[in-house]
Amino acid sequence: MAKVETVKRRSPRKVKRSPIGASPGTLIADPAARQSALSLTLISPDECKFIGNASLRDVAESCAGWPVIWLDCVGLANVELIAEIGAIFKLHPLAFEDTVNTGQRPKVDFFDDHAFVVVSAIDDALAGRYEQMSLFFGENFVVTFQEREGDPFGPVRKRIKANLPNRLRTRKADYLAYALIDAIVDSYFPILESKGETIDGIEDEMLSGIGRHQVRELHELKRGMIVLKRALWPLRDALAALLRAEVPFIYPETKVYLNDTHDHSVRLIEVVEMHRDMLTGLIEMHLSLSQARTNDVISFLTIVSAIFIPLTFLAGIWGMNFDPGASPWNRPELLSYYGYPIALGMMAVIGFSLVGFFRWKKWL
């Protein structure tokens, strides 16, 4: 029995939304959300302090004593905790609704004394899984919310610990917010480089010989490019909005660095578009090569059939039952002593003649 190949279908991501008619700013936890855990980073020009498994009391006590604080909340299950964080930093409730209801479009919103940024970060490169990261920042604080453990902020934490001179220790919270956003944007580059190498490998493989698995791989890669485009295009617009913003908690010297991150996002979009065009071309090339291969097979079978048609005709005539004794017209050559080799020789001559004719016409 032939082995049936099963295709694993990817279940679509369900975007959680508030119930219809709910009051603006209503926080409803997703049943699948992870339990919330807080980590606190306290920053000053002279020192820095990290508090894992921080409590709200730690957060409230640190707000007045440190120039810049960074609160990182991993997991969005505890909406009461999230609401209390909003109360401590006086964050807008509408932004918290977008924080809890993940799957938002990357964007930036400005309020009186803080900004709210939503970005899509690569959570699992191999599985192609993304997560929403929400970031609030004001004059002296940055608050980040993640769906689950794992983030690209490791280099930023190392830079905070590094010795002076250290811009992350001497500048305001807007520079820390820039560093976190820049880390998220730069995390896309290794993924795109890996996908580019995969595309080049499939192209080289197709030039050697086409296979059915290549079509599936190309379509999966193209679907991944669409997801990347959906995340990067609005991210570019959000970074442009940060650059244009005239708010007191974003300083002009930070906008110079934000402009560099904006350039990175533009480069990423260009790479995504280039990969999409390459994938579209490879899919079309695969279809063309498959059709050409099919045409070659059909042409070969047609030539083989054309060669055997006259041979079958002769074999059919000589295979008919006649009685030469009844009439001289009833196939007297059936009694020929060399009839069998003569018939085979004639068939061979006709067959080779047709092959030579097809070669002369360059059909073979």
Image (cartoon, rainbow, N blue to C red):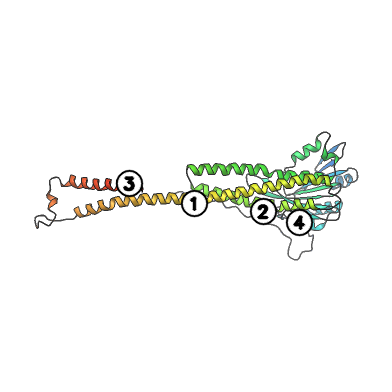
Which three-letter amino acid code belongs to the residue tagged 4? Asp
Between residues 111 and 240, which one lies in front from this camera angle? 240
Q: How much space separates mark 3 and mark 2, taking CA atoms?
A: 56 Å
Which three-letter amino acid code belongs to the residue tagged 1? Leu
Q: How much space separates mark 4 and mark 3, taking CA atoms?
A: 73 Å
> Which one is closest to the eye, mark 3 or mark 2?
3
User: Pointer 1: residues within 10 angstroms few (<14), some, or many (20+)?
Assistant: some
Label 2 sits on a secondary structure element that is helix
Percent position (x, y) of residue 27?
78, 58
Side of 315 where 16 appears, left or right: right
Label at residue 287: 1
> Which one is closest to the eye, mark 1 or mark 2?
1
Label 1 sits on a secondary structure element that is helix
Instruction: Check the image and report above or below for 161 versus 211.
Output: above
Q: Earlier in the sequence, mark 3 or mark 2?
A: 2
> Which one is closest to the eye, mark 4 or mark 3?
3
Q: Earlier in the sequence, mark 2 or mark 4?
A: 4
Residue that lies at the very extreme toward the front in this rendered image: 360
Which residue corresponds to mark 3? Answer: 360
Residue at point 51%, 47% (across, down): 213
Which residue corresponds to mark 2? Answer: 230
Contact, CB < 8 Å: mark 1 with mark 2?
no
Residue at point 11%, 54% (across, down): 324
